[in-house]
Image (spheres, rainbow, N blue to C red):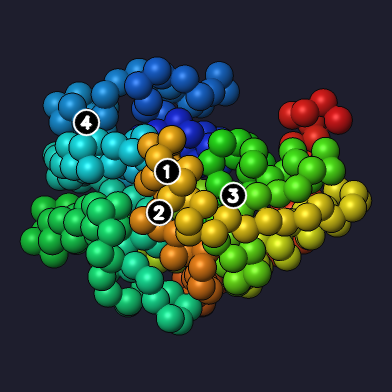
């Protein structure tokens, strides 16, 4: 494919870089610190991706630009707009396909498994930020200025994921230590969990196939599990007793929000854990002949990674 420019050196950006480099692509991984990899075939660049001129220069000659950025959760309204505008500029000047990694916030609360044709009707601030980004990119695509697609995932989990995700640092180390796991909302409602290797494979897939252009796609994702079920399967993969799983009621979240800006921001999306929050990825699976990693296999890989990280 040629030059591949990835914005964001978090877990998804790093693993996407590894995948593309394994295919002998020329990979440029852009982050503020220029960190993320010392692997052959991956050039790590320190840059402010919201600087349109800088990003356009980095994207010169690229065939794809991947937006895997992850601004601080409490700063989406200030940090995303200039970054999104810069990405559009870079995609237009380079002719590269813009592939955005997004989430399900834009839909807002729904009473059915989410599909890509559902309206982006979120009343929440973060959901509206995501919806605006996509609508602006789609308008530029339809005007012939850029080529773009978007990949939407539910909550991430998997090897390499630490402080992000409800099945990450707040979950697996506690399972291995025999400690209770604390979630928010109802721990028994069905919830979709997107496995990081499936996420990055989906990003690479849509970038290489023009059938993806001009619309959004859902990451191939295994059938939903409640938090309690997910914890039980992770404990089973670890061959340890299943710990207690506790939910945090809305009032508790409000109280914690008074002491933590991060927790205060969680209130907006707490609906995702008080009712079923399920992603339908059948369109992607059918179109690109893809299947999600079985949940038991994903749990085994996640547990193995954490054990190695924790030295156990």
Residue 122 falls in image quadrant: bottom left
Q: Nearer the viewer, residue 99 or 31?
A: 31
Residue 173 falls in image quadrant: top right
- For the residues labelled 1 and 3, say whether their Cβ atoms are less than 8 Å apart: no
Quarter in which the C terminus is drawn: top right
Indicate the position of residue 304 as horizontal and vertical percent values.
79, 41
The Cα–Cα distance between marks 1 and 3, rounded to whole angstroms, is 17 Å
Instruction: Tell me which residue sits at (75%, 48%) in the image.
Output: 180
Indicate the position of residue 179 as horizontal and vertical percent values.
79, 43
The Cα–Cα distance between marks 1 and 2, rounded to whole angstroms, is 8 Å
Q: Residues within 10 Å of mark 1 (few under 14, many from 20)?
A: some
* Closer to viewer: mark 2 or mark 4: 2
Residue position for label 3 = 166
Q: Determine the secondary structure under disc 2.
A: helix
The Cα–Cα distance between marks 2 and 4, rounded to whole angstroms, is 28 Å
Q: Is residue 80 left or right of residue 110?
A: left
Q: Nearer the viewer, residue 240 or 119?
A: 240
In this picture, is 97 found above or below 15?
Answer: below
Q: Determine the secondary structure under disc 1.
A: helix
Q: Which mark is residue 50?
A: 4
Between disc 2 and disc 4, whose residue precedes? 4
Q: Determine the secondary structure under disc 4.
A: loop
């Amino acid at each position: 494919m040629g030059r591949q420019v990835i914005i964001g050196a978090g877990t998804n950006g790093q693993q996407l870089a590894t995948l593309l480099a394994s295919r002998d692509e020329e990979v440029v991984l852009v982050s503020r610190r220029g960190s993320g990899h010392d692997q052959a075939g991956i050039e790590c660049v320190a840059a402010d991706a919201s600087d349109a001129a800088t990003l356009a220069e980095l994207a010169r000659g690229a065939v794809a630009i991947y937006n895997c950025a992850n601004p601080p959760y409490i700063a989406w309204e200030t940090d995303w707009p200039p970054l999104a505008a810069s990405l559009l500029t870079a995609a237009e000047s380079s002719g590269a396909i813009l592939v955005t990694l997004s989430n399900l916030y834009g839909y807002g609360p729904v009473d059915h498994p989410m599909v890509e044709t559902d309206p982006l009707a979120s009343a929440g601030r973060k959901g509206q930020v995501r919806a605006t980004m996509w609508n602006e990119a789609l308008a530029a695509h339809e005007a012939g200025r850029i080529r773009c697609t978007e990949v939407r995932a539910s909550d991430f989990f998997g090897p390499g994921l630490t402080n992000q995700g409800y099945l990450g640092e707040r979950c697996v180390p506690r399972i291995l230590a025999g400690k209770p796991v604390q979630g928010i909302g109802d721990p028994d409602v069905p919830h979709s969990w997107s496995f990081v290797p499936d996420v990055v494979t989906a990003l690479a897939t849509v970038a290489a196939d023009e059938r993806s252009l001009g619309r959004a796609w859902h990451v191939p994702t295994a059938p939903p599990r409640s938090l309690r079920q997910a914890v039980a399967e992770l404990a089973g993969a670890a061959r340890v007793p299943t710990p207690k799983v506790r939910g945090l009621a809305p009032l508790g979240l409000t109280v914690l929000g008074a002491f933590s800006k991060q927790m205060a921001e969680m209130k907006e999306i707490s609906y995702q854990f008080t009712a079923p929050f399920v992603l339908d990825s059948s369109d992607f699976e059918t179109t690109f002949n893809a299947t999600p990693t079985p949940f038991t296999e994903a749990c085994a890989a996640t547990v193995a990674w954490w054990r190695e990280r924790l030295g156990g």
